[in-house]
Image (spheres, helix red, strand yellow):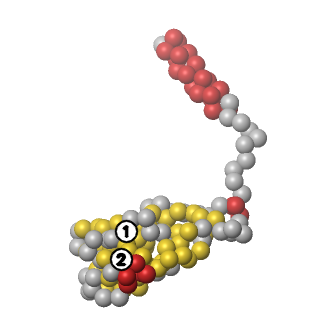
Amino acid sequence: MAVRCSLWHGAVGLVAVMVSGCRPDAQPPKVADTVAVSHSADSLAVSRGGVEVWFTLPRTSRASDGKQCLERGLEIRRGRTPIRVPLLYTGESPILLNDTTMRAVLWTHCQPLDTYLVDLRTGRPMRERERNRE
């Protein structure tokens, strides 16, 4: 019993030494320097006629003046079939144009850039100017 007890206390002591070996001078990031991002919380952006467009995959971004913002991906949900819109992060709600198309604005570094028309059946984004050429 004494041997078993001393082994247990030795293991507890070893864990305590390992934990106390962390650097005490390491400072957590300042609250003002970070933007809180909830990676698990999707939010509904817009819906109509059984089609829902959700904000997903949030990421923090930084503008040229140093301010941070939240840019989010888009996912189309119709029934049980989610369709991610590839490579299109935005800082504003998309607009449903009709049953098959929405307009979304691509954001990079907290700035709106190009406007895309997104096929609600496939999730394929196409720059709006390019579509007018076809």
Element class at badge 1 = loop
28 relative to 62, above or below: above
Q: Residue at x 68, y 30 (%)?
A: 21
Query: Callout 1 environment at 10 Å: few (<14), some (14 to 19), or many (20+)?
Result: many
Are discs 2 and 1 less than 8 Å apart at CB? yes
Q: CA distance from mark 2 to mark 1?
A: 8 Å
Q: Picture coordinates of residue 14 (x, y %)?
A: 60, 23
8 relative to 31, above or below: above
Residue 9: which quarter of the image? top right
Q: Residue at x 74, y 39 (%)?
A: 24
Frontmost residue, 38 versus 60 = 60
Give, as a three-letter code, the residue at label 2. Val
Q: Tell me if 112 is positioned left or right of 78 in this view.
A: right
Q: Picture coordinates of residue 23 (x, y %)?
A: 71, 36
Q: Residue furthest bottom?
A: 98
Residue receiving disc 1: 85
Residue receiving disc 2: 118
Sooner in the amino-acid sequence: mark 2 or mark 1: 1
Q: Picture coordinates of residue 119 (x, y %)?
A: 31, 77
Q: Picture coordinates of residue 58 (x, y %)?
A: 49, 65
41 relative to 18, above or below: below
Residue 45 visible in this rendered orientation of the protein: no
Residue 76 visible in this rendered orientation of the protein: yes
Residue 74: which quarter of the image? bottom left
Q: Residue at x 70, y 61 (%)?
A: 33
Viewport quadrant of the C terminus: bottom left
